[in-house]
Image: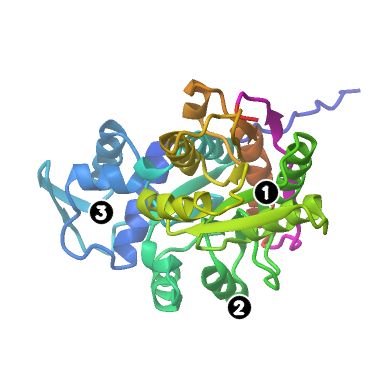
Amino acid sequence: MTAKTAHSPALPKRLSLVTQTMHTLCEGILAGHWQKRLPGERELCERLQVSRRTLRTALEEMQRTGWLDVTHRQSRRIKRKRAAARPAAPKGMVAVLSPSPLQAMSQKALVLVDVLREKLANAGCSMELHVIPRCFSAHPARALRQLVHARSAAVWLLVGSAEPTQKWFFRQRLPCLVLGSSCPGIALPSVDADHRAVCRHAGGLLLRKGHQRIALVLPQRNAAGDVASEEGLRESLGTGRDTQLRVLRHDGTAEHLCSLLDDALRESGPPTAYVVARPTHVLTVMMHLMRWGRRIPQDVAVISRDDDTYLQATSPSIARYAVDPARFARRISLAARQLAETGTLPAISIRLMPAYVPGETV
């Protein structure tokens, strides 16, 4: 009697970056994004976020399969032959939509993007970055329609999105995951740090240190995570008569933020502690306080709601809250893969609690 041999399941295949690059270029040609010729190598490398070696290998394969006619390295003519076969689509194309290019992102964000790309590739998914500021304007509908029409994606990941962008994706019923917090009343799944819990903890810490006049420094965009931050800080301060919370909303420039700090410092009872969103603005706050002659932490305390690599190099060391970007990327990858495979994901809010990193500013 012959025993049956049990075959182990096939290992998941990792799509090469060359294959993903080729697929992206072919999709762009089919969508009419490029009509007669492809742009130069430098522009394509920046747009696709790949190396020149990877790009050239993909272009050579496209020439071999009849997509391109290459006369010079910088002049690749698009061929309109029916024989040109469309490459097989990856198992799941994950499109990341961002208002900012990679070079403008923080070090932590770059690590997150890199780890996320790797984890999605290991799962058989490809990742594509779209940097289109118009999709994040107050009226993004036209830009978003053009993008979705030109690019097919199994999942859309929204970075730095506000209510208009989130509302459009929600109404279109597109598979979408918010990297950040979804706005109130918009039932989209999201992954973010628990800013509410962070600021509640920060408020309690400052109260125990004897601070009663506290300022919360936020961008004017009023993102959902920033709203949650204010709610958490107000919860920790309670309704006591002696506690005061002042919210400083700036336009993102150092000039405007410093003018708001000037106004607060000229008051008869200025804040004695600052909770600041975004690492860049923490440095502005600290340096401007020092310009006013305020000693940190003897005269005023500063806590950063967020973290970035360069905050580890400051003196005094900054008290802050940090989330491991690899852990963040794992949660995003799991949610994105579920969306890509099933097309659905409950409108849950996945919140990761950052670790408090003690510093010398409190």
Q: Quadrant of residue 183?
A: bottom right
Q: Position of residue 102 (x, y in %)?
A: 38, 43
Q: Nearer the viewer, residue 325 or 170?
A: 325
Q: Which residue is mark 3?
A: 67
In primary-sequence order, the first of circles 1 and 3 is 3
Residue 211 on the magenta segment: no
Image mark for residue 171: 2
Q: Closer to us: mark 2 or mark 1?
A: 1
Number of other residues with Cα within 10 Å of mark 2, as a class: few under 14, some 14 to 19, many 20 or more: few
Residue found at x 67% / y 55%: 245
Q: Is residue 157 visible?
A: no
Badge 2 vs badge 1, beta-carbon distance below 8 Å: no
Q: How many marks?
A: 3
Q: Amino acid at mark 1?
A: Arg
Give the extent of the magenta segment: 344-360
Q: Position of residue 97 (x, y in %)?
A: 47, 57
**Are discs 1 and 3 less than 8 Å apart at CB?**
no
